[in-house]
Amino acid sequence: MNQARFLAVVAVSLFVTQSASLIVAPLLVDIATEFDSSVAVAGQLATATFAAWAVSVVISGPMSDSLGRRPVALAGLSLLSIGVMPSAFAPNLGILLVLMVVTRLGGGMIPPNSMAAVADVVSPARRAQALGGLLAFTTLSSVIGVPLVAVLADWGDWRSPFLVAGSLLAVCTFFTWLWFPKSGCGEIRPFSFFSRYKTLLANPVFRAAMAANLGQRIAFFALFSYSAAYLIDAYDINLGEVALPLAIIGIGPVVGSYIAGIVGNWNNRVLFICACSLAGGLAASMLFLIDVPIWVILALGTCATALLSVGWPVLITLTTEISGESQATGIGLLGSSNQLGGVEGAALGGVMLAAVGFPGVGYLCLGAVLFSAVVITLFMRQPHANAKLSSHEPM
């Protein structure tokens, strides 16, 4: 196996998968107009597909650990291609909804399977760097992929981005079949489902990692969900003008993932991500609480998203170390705390916004990272990063 080619196809697959998952948002107005519907009704495409992704990211882990990485990678990319390409020809909103659900079911299989496959073939000493680099590249989809969708739709119509994304996914599927390892990480083990969950959830370190990640992602998604509305309300700018500030803030997760690749093997990595999340939560709260020029807001937002993005890749690295032969299952379960953090960040942020205004979103960000810090401090003692942990070894 050529490791460079393998990592390249994983990186591109993750990038295109993430871009495909974001494809609907910038097209909602055009889709609603095409099918004589409201934007609110068309927006339910995102709701349904979010649920499909959440289900897929959890159940695909045991499939990957039992059936092998290669079959799951090919199945996920195939489902993505089947869902995305025909969406360009959807005759009505109902058919488009079904195809988007298929897309998300396939998309949810790719991240945990890909990360576990990388953990299988990359040495422990380089694992954190590889995972951090892949996540940094994947995160670029929110900075590059979404604007490209808008450009393609402007050149053609809302169907054009689906044709391009579907073609790219078909190419990724071919090269995955060509370059993905055919042995080693593809070894078939006896199929087990609930036993893998039971073993992982019995591990106090893994439970603490999920809880700590949940707090950090609540803060991250609360900030990301309401920063545009805050900029429009506080600085009297329109929706078109807010695109550039959001792109600048979107650079933060790329930087945070890159930093995670550097610190992922440090002996004090858990304390480091605790400090980062506290600093990020403080920056996020200040964004909503203080009256400063917009460039200061952009600096705070970029720093906050960067600092709040360091923990996720580091905790993935930790999960690969403590999950034994259930690496994809562990990454999928950890990913479910990401999804839950997105739901709670947006929902609780909305409640706090309705109750006390935008400062309430800042209070939520700060409270969420304080919760994460308490979990890390009380339940996650730090061993050497490369130490091999048993499924019940405390950290």
Image: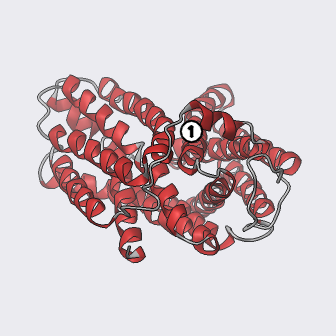
- Compared to 192, does 128 lie above or below? below
The outermost residue toward the front is 190
Q: Is residue 289 visible?
A: yes
Residue 328, image x, y percentages: 53, 48
The crowding category of the residue bearing disc 1, from other C-alpha atoms within 10 Å (few below 14, some 14 to 19, many at least 20), is: many
Which is more toward the observer, 38 or 14?
14
- Compared to 261, does 93 lie above or below? above
Tag 1 secondary structure = helix
The reply, left or right, for residue 31 in relation to residue 243 is: left
Q: Which residue is mark 1?
A: 336
Q: Is residue 233 visible?
A: no
The outermost residue toward the right is 378
- Residue drawn 54% across the image and 47% down it: 224
Pick the quarter of the image with the N terminus: bottom left
Which is more toward the observer, 91 or 235?
91
Which is more toward the observer, 48 or 41?
48
- Residue drawn 70% across the image and 48% down it: 285
Residue 113, image x, y percentages: 46, 51
Pick the quarter of the image with the C terminus: bottom right
- Residue drawn 46% across the image and 46% down it: 64
Residue 14, image x, y percentages: 39, 57
Residue 11, image x, y percentages: 40, 64
The reply, left or right, for residue 51 in relation to residue 177 is: right
Which is more toward the observer, 269 or 109?
109
The image shows a total of numbered marks equal to 1
Q: Which amino acid does the dot numbered 1 rest on?
A: Ser
- Compared to 381, does 162 lie above or below? above
- Residue drawn 44% across the image and 49% down it: 188
